[in-house]
Each structure stands twice: as C-alpha cells, then as structure tokens.
Amino acid sequence: MKLKDKVAIITGGGGGIGRATAVLFAKEGAQVVVSDINQESAQETVNLIKSEGGEAVSVVADMANHVDVEKLVSFTTETYGGLDIIFNNAGVGNQEVKLADLPVEEWDRVVDINLKGVFLGMKYAIPKMIERGGGAIINTSSLLGFKGKKYVSAYNASKGGVITLSKNAAVEYGTKNIRVNAVAPGVIDTDIIQNWKDDERKWPLISRACALGRIGQPEEVAKAVLFLASDDASYVTGTSLLVDGGGLTF
C-alpha cells in the first residue's frame, strides 16, 4: 500500500474528486480526515471508506475561515498523532458573466474558498509536517488556471493563483522535506459542471473539447493525486500536473 500509516486531510471531501481521493487514499492505507462544509456529505464519504475496511473521520470546516482550518489541522494531529498529507481540494465556481458584471461579493467568495483556502490549509499544515519530518501537499488548480475562459474570471484567477502559490511553498519548504504540487483537472464529471451539462447547445461541444474526446472521471484525478502524495513522486515538487485529457493541448 502506497500510503500505509500516513495521515491525510482531504478538503472538499464530501463529493467529486475529494470523495474519490479520500476513498483511494484509505484503500492505500492512509488514515483519512474528510473535511467538507456539508456534514452529511463528509460523513457519507467516511461511511464509504469504513464499509471497505478503511479508517476515516469527518470534520465540518469552512476553508475560507482561518479558525475552522486551524481547528481542522489540530483535530487531525490530536486524533492521529500527526499529519503527513493534505489535499487542499475544496472549491467553488462562479456564475458565468462578464467580469464587469460579476458582483464583488461573489468574487470574494470564490477567491476566499479557492485560493485563500489553499493558503490557510498550507499555513496550518506545514508546521505540523515539519514536526513530522516532512510531508506532501497537493492543491487543486484547474485547466483554467493555465488559460483564460470567458465569463469565469474569479474562478480562473483563483486557480491561476493556486499554481503560483504552490510553487512559492515548494521553494520555501523543500529543504524541510515538504513537497508541494498542484493538480489541474480539466472537465471532470462532478457537480461543479452541472450547469454546462444542462446546456443542450454548449454541452456537446464542451464534453468533447479535449484530445481524448470525453470528460474525465473523479477517480482518474484521484489516481494523479495519489501519485503526488506518495513516495513515487519523491523528487516531484513545485509542479502542476494537468489531468485534462489533453484539454490544454486541444
């Protein structure tokens, strides 16, 4: 097992990529703390893990709230004795409007969760990892962190920020044996793309707009996250791994 006896936090673990990763991490031997703003969803993930013989607990946390994030990390170390991995995955999209028409409050909400939440996750996790002798951090960016797309300015900006922030942390903490990478999914079959799927005009185009000609599944991203979290990626840090079916190339 690639993560035997490791302790991992998964934020946004109540569904989609977060749930798929939490389940996979547990299968690979990790003790998993599933964090989500929705208690019921987080517990559903824990129940899935336990039904397969894994070890997990759920914690409700708003990743834009520094008090919640600090408590999440403290709970993890108190429960399992340390912290080896954090997957800062919680994220939201914004309504599709032109930049000048995006409400300031919505900009703040998206950037607070998608970018500030990653900062806070790393801020509180890194000292615990240093105590542990090292660790692995994976932050969720996006294909749209690499290129612009009309009408999703807050999302694009936040995900581009995650890429650069991950590089900053990798440089600052590499000598502490802490690896920091980002994963950048393309169009993945999760709730965040439901509006696209409901658009009968756009969806046939969006769903095939990559080299592989199909959308991805959460489990496919989870496998990439597992690689970055494991010793298989022991010399990989400061990078952003595209899991986009060739979407950027397309």
Image (cartoon, helix red, strand yellow):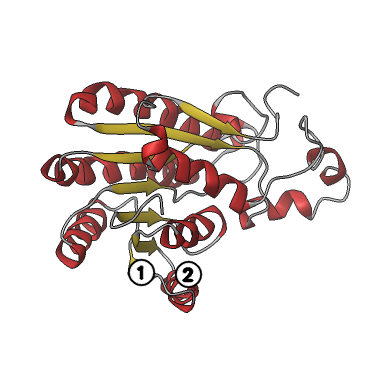
The answer to whether 39 is drawn above or below residue 32 in the figure is below
The answer to whether 230 is drawn above or below residue 7 in the figure is above
Instruction: Using the numbered discs, state the Cα–Cα distance from disc 2 to disc 1 in whole angstroms.
Output: 9 Å
The answer to whether 44 is drawn above or below residue 184 in the figure is below
Q: Check contact, mark 2 vs mark 1: CB within 8 A.
A: yes
Q: Quadrant of residue 111?
A: top left
Helix, strand or loop at label 1? It is strand
Q: Position of residue 60 (x, y in %)?
A: 34, 67
Residue 188 can be seen in this image: yes
**Direction front: furthest residue:** 1
Circle number at residue 45: 2
Question: Dot 2 surroundings within 10 Å: few (below 14), some, or many (20 or more)?
Answer: many
The residue at 61%/47% (across/down) is 220
Q: Position of residue 207 (x, y in %)?
A: 79, 43
Q: Earlier in the sequence, mark 2 or mark 1?
A: 2
Residue 93 can be seen in this image: no
Circle number at residue 127: none
Q: Is residue 97 left or right of residue 117?
A: right
Query: Identity of the amino acid at label 2?
Result: Thr
Q: Position of residue 66 (x, y in %)?
A: 24, 51
Between 167 and 47, which is closer to the camera in this rendering? 47
Helix, strand or loop at label 2? It is helix
The answer to whether 30 is drawn above or below residue 41 in the figure is above
The residue at 67%/25% (across/down) is 248
Which residue matches tag 1?
A: 56
Point out the image quarter for the C terminus.
top right
Mark toward the viewer: 2 or 1: 1
Q: Is residue 246 left or right of residue 54?
A: right
The residue at 64%/33% (across/down) is 98
The residue at 43%/25% (across/down) is 239
Q: How many marks?
A: 2
